[in-house]
Amino acid sequence: MSFVTILYAVLFYVAAIILFVGLAYRIYEYSIIPAPLKIPTPPAPQTQRGVIFRFFKEVVLFESLFSATKWTWLFSWLFHFALLLAAFRHLKYFTDPVWFWVSFDIVQAAGHYGAYVMIFGLLGLLGRRIFVDRVRYISSPSDYLILILIISIALTGLMMKWFQTDILAVRQFFLGLMYFQLSELPNDFMLLIHLSLVILLMIIFPYSKLLHAPGLFFSPTRNQTDTAREKRHISKWAREIEN
Amino acid sequence: MAENKFNTPQIREYPVIPALEKEATLHLAPFKSKEEFQSSLGYPGELVDNWQEKALDKMGDLLKKYRSLRVYLDSCMQCGACTDKCHYYLGTKDPNNMPVGRQNLMRSVYRRYFTLPGKYFPKLVGAQDLTKEVLDEWYSYYHQCSQCRRCAVFCPIGIDTAEISMAAREVMDSIGVGQKYCNEIIGKVHKIGNNLGLPEPALEDTLEGLEEDVVDEVGIDVKFPLDQKGADVLLVTPSADFFAEPHVDGLIGYAKVFHQAGISWTLSSHASEAANFGMFIGSYENMRKLALRIREAALELNVKRIVFGECGHAWRVAYSFLNTLAGPFDFLDSRYPVPQHICEVTNDLIDKKVLNFDKSANDDMTLTYHDSCNVARASNMGGIMGGQFSIPRKIIKAAANNYFDMDEETIKEKTYCCGGGGGLLTDDLIELRVKGALPRMEALKQVVDEKGVTHMAAICAICKSQFSKVFQYYGLELDQIVSLHQLVGNALIMNKKEV
């Protein structure tokens, strides 16, 4: 085993633990904190099914953002959608045998061109941060850096087209990580940069605003039903005050 | 007077998002609460010595009690979708009045003391120490939020700035920095029973006077009962309804509706206030204590139903929180929701054809309707989605011939706050109130010019008081704001035989 292989294997394990344990812990924290009052915003559904439909519209279409600002909606929706396409393309590195639909040409091509769309969307978001005075005012260095980090991941991913690597060996490396049978990672510069940036993203995820992903599902203004009069909603600590 | 020291914003033909003016309203801090009022609410009388430590303890406590606070402080992407949604930003141009700007005042402190990156790399993630300057900013800007939730409608995550400003006010109260207006009023309700400190004999006198007025006006003996045991309905209404214009015309309207429908009802001297300022200061305990007065009154008077008068924030606490705070209400008639809004009562009676109107009685007015923020975005009516928008409009159209909505972007769930909600309806914040009213005034001016609208109806005591005050700054007359049930009362055909 080369030093590079061992280093990246260790880094990936550490990053994966931080990402998954960190995220699971955040979700656990959110789930145990009570929401003592009913605060859904309109149009507030009256049934659980309505809440699911509401989330479907928020997660798939970014409905609220669309009603707020069309440019931000366009850039961020394109970015997230393209990110999903890119993720599908990358499933070939983590599934064995490769899931049948992942190897479809259209899925692979969409993942590739998705990278361009992703960069377009991210540059749009970055542009807003730089040129719109209100967004510039609220931006801290980390807001720019996260955008730059993800742009860099997409760019280095795209560059692999020209800085080719042995993708079968890369796949073997990741499957090896998953099944604890370490296999050699190609020692190619662009690949290692790409992977390093991904590792960094994994590590910062549970400590950054990227928590908006789980956060949305725990947002009481969005996940509550509008049934305050029909059913008494009371949290544990509020019940304790009553006694 | 402070009223002369600022310029009323210009009404613009095509509203554009203003450019930032940093610290434009940092100086607008409301008067602080005195020791006697602080202590009656269980808070220290002045800034405590170890205030920073105490404030952070309180924050930590609230972060464990309110999921909204924790999730909202974590989840903001700083995307900017909310930045042009707050009426106070549009009116003052101060970036700390952008919803995210306001949130960041607390978020930066949260990051500094409660997150890993903020502890080690504060500059990188925009974290800052809780200094005296930051506390002063909190005091100014968390009292420049009317908790109207317009930002929460547009936020892709649903982050509700109201949750954060309520928490901030609670943290400040806990270290002895309270706001005079809210805390004095809460003290009055605890002591006397209503926001205005109107004692029972005065209330009784007022109601008798109203009975005489109505007899003089329509020749019918419409009663305004107080503390009448065994009545069907307990009416809980904002105390402004007892004497201020146009509020009192609304109260007359409710009384006429009950009279005409033959529903026996009563007011309570113990719960002579619908508004619950405990919400404004984010204090669950105070909110609960105030809400319990209503339960106690309902039990004492042995009523079957509870109905709320026209009051926006009161209706939020009533509709969304009352069951939580003071429930369960299993001792009331289960055929009716608890509580009901007076508009729901009137609407049902219209549907059942119990109420009939002579619409021409309101022909001297061309009307529009202001959706009060807390009715629109924090409650419902009629148990149907959007009932809080459709029911009041339906009633107005039943009672009046001439009605036009304002611009679609400024009504219903996108309505603008009047500029005086959330505990800001105080003269020491008049500059903020005038500036914050700008978006509503622009939308109103548009229908005044284009549709010939002469009057705006509302169902919130704060809205009515605020508009009566700020209309003059925008060239409107103070009586151009009317109560919804004033229209009902004007047009209702009263059946004399039943008396």
Image (cartoon, helix red, strand yellow):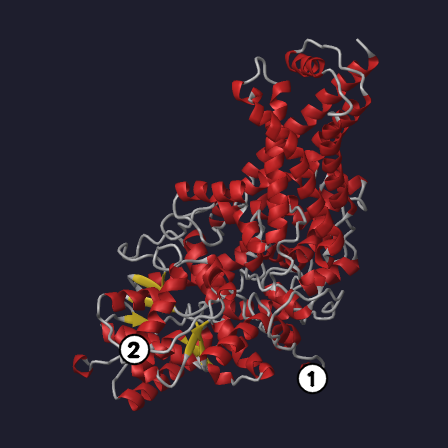
Query: Quadrant of the rendered structure where residue B403 is?
Result: bottom left
Q: Which amino acid does label 2 sit on?
A: Lys
B183 to the left or right of A177: left
Residue ID for mark 1: B4
- Which sits in the foreground, B189 or B476? B476
In this picture, is A65 found above or below B396?
above
Nearest to the eye among marks 1 and 2: give it: 1
Query: Quadrant of the rendered structure where residue B47 is?
Result: bottom right
User: x and y percent of residue B252 in the render?
Assistant: 35, 79
Ranked by sequence position, the earlier of labels 1 and 2 is 1
Q: Label 1's element?
A: helix
Which residue occupies 32% across, 86% down? B214
Task: Give me the C-alpha separation between circle 1 and circle 2.
Answer: 42 Å
User: x and y percent of residue B69 in the render?
Assistant: 60, 48
Q: What residue type is labelled 1?
A: Asn
- Which sits in the foreground, B7 or B67? B7
Q: Label 2's element?
A: helix
Circle 2 crowding by C-alpha within 10 Å: few under 14, some 14–19, many from 20: many
Which residue occupies 53% across, 18% down? A100
Q: Do labels 1 and 2 share a chain?
A: yes
> Which quadrant of the figure contains the C terminus of chain B?
bottom left
Residue ID for mark 2: B256
Residue most toward the bottom? B216
In this picture, is B270 found above or below B80?
below
Query: Quadrant of the rendered structure where residue B417 is?
Result: bottom right
